Image: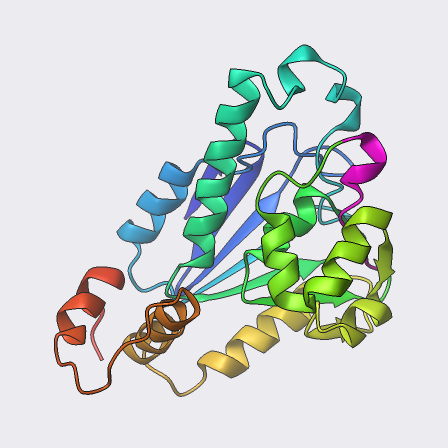
């Protein structure tokens, strides 16, 4: 099953979903909301068997982020209402992805900069090719990360390193990103998609959809500052609202 929306294609096969960003050689985010949140939400609701989502970019790169040639346009001013609304929708999309009760992986080939890295940071896991480069270089263009990248990078690499990276516009190699635990695995292949799919397959092997969604829902609640009391049986009803209906153990 295939869905096309904004700058991306969503493909669902069995219990697996893949979003591919497709916009030129660098997969530039001419629209911050790279896939319409409503389209993604409706697709996952219609396919409750899905337990994993991989986000990747078509061709050689994940995404080089926003098209910097637009930065001098009046509509790209942080004070412009249209710009603010576009970023609001993008933030809501990434928050939705971050809180999905499924395994989420960013499969990163080539450049993963700015908004591209902000997308990857909304996933639980990041797997990249050995030739990948990652960074939030917005400061070099007179702006700052606009889709909660500062907050997410801080949670992953720590406050001091995040501040240093963002203020300097530092670009990391795959090896350096692995040392910082920004990525979880570096593939020796030019295209890391197979490694990402194998990583997901290994995590899902022998587990039911209900087990996977229950565990991730609990982890999401705890990470969001809402730990579940294990003696609180009301969690069963809370969980039923969070995971897709129709999934049986």
Relative to residue 18, is residue 189 depicted above or below?
Answer: below
Is residue 48 left or right of 237 when viewed as pictured? Answer: right
**Residue 162: where, in percent of width, then height?**
73, 59
Is residue 73 left or right of 38 when viewed as pictured? Answer: right
Q: Residue furthest top?
A: 74
Q: Residue at x 85, y 60 (%)?
A: 172
Q: Is residue 246 visible?
A: no
Q: Is residue 106 visible?
A: yes
Please state which of residues 10 and 170 is positioned toward the viewer in this rendering: 170
How many numbered marks, from 0 up? 0
Q: Quadrant of the C terminus?
A: bottom left
Is residue 197 left or right of 188 when viewed as pictured? Answer: left
**Residue 228: where, in percent of width, then height?**
27, 77
Q: Residue furthest front?
A: 160
Which stretch did the figure color magenta?
132-142
Please state which of residues 227 and 25 is positioned toward the viewer in this rendering: 227
**Residue 241: where, in percent of width, then height?**
19, 61
Within the magenta stretch, is there residue 149?
no
Within the magenta stretch, is there residue 140?
yes
Please state which of residues 74 and 45 is positioned toward the viewer in this rendering: 74
Q: Residue at x 44, y 69 (%)?
A: 223
Relative to residue 71, is residue 249 depicted above or below?
Answer: below
Q: Residue at x 67, y 72 (%)?
A: 195
Please state which of residues 200 and 112 is positioned toward the viewer in this rendering: 112
Relative to residue 120, is residue 247 depicted above or below?
Answer: below
In terms of image quadrants, where is residue 237? bottom left
Q: How is the image coloured?
A: rainbow
Relative to residue 31, is residue 166 depicted above or below?
Answer: below
**Residue 206: where, in percent of width, then height?**
40, 88
């Amino acid at each position: 099953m295939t869905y096309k929306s904004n700058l991306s294609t969503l493909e669902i096969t069995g219990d697996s979903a893949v979003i591919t960003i497709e916009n030129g050689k660098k997969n530039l985010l001419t629209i911050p909301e790279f896939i319409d949140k409503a389209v993604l939400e409706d697709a996952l609701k219609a396919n409750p068997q899905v337990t994993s989502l991989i986000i990747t970019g078509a061709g050689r790169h994940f995404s080089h982020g926003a098209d910097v040639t637009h930065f001098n346009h009046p509509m790209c001013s942080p004070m412009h209402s249209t710009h603010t609304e576009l970023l609001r929708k993008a933030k809501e999309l990434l928050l939705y992805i971050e809180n999905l009760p499924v395994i989420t992986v960013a499969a990163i080939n080539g450049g993963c900069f700015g908004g591209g890295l902000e997308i990857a940071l909304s996933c639980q896991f990041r797997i990249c090719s050995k030739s990948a480069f990652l960074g939030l270089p917005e400061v070099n263009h007179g702006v700052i990360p606009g889709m909660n990248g500062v907050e997410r990078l801080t949670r992953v690499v720590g406050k001091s390193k995040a501040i240093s990276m963002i203020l300097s516009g530092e670009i990391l190699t795959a090896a350096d990103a692995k040392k910082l635990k920004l990525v979880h695995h570096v593939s020796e292949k030019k295209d890391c998609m197979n490694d990402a799919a194998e990583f997901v397959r290994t995590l899902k092997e022998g587990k039911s959809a209900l087990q996977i969604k229950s565990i991730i829902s609990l982890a999401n609640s705890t990470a969001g500052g809402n730990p579940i009391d294990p003696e609180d049986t009301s969690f069963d009803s809370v969980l039923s609202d969070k995971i897709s209906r129709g999934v049986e153990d």
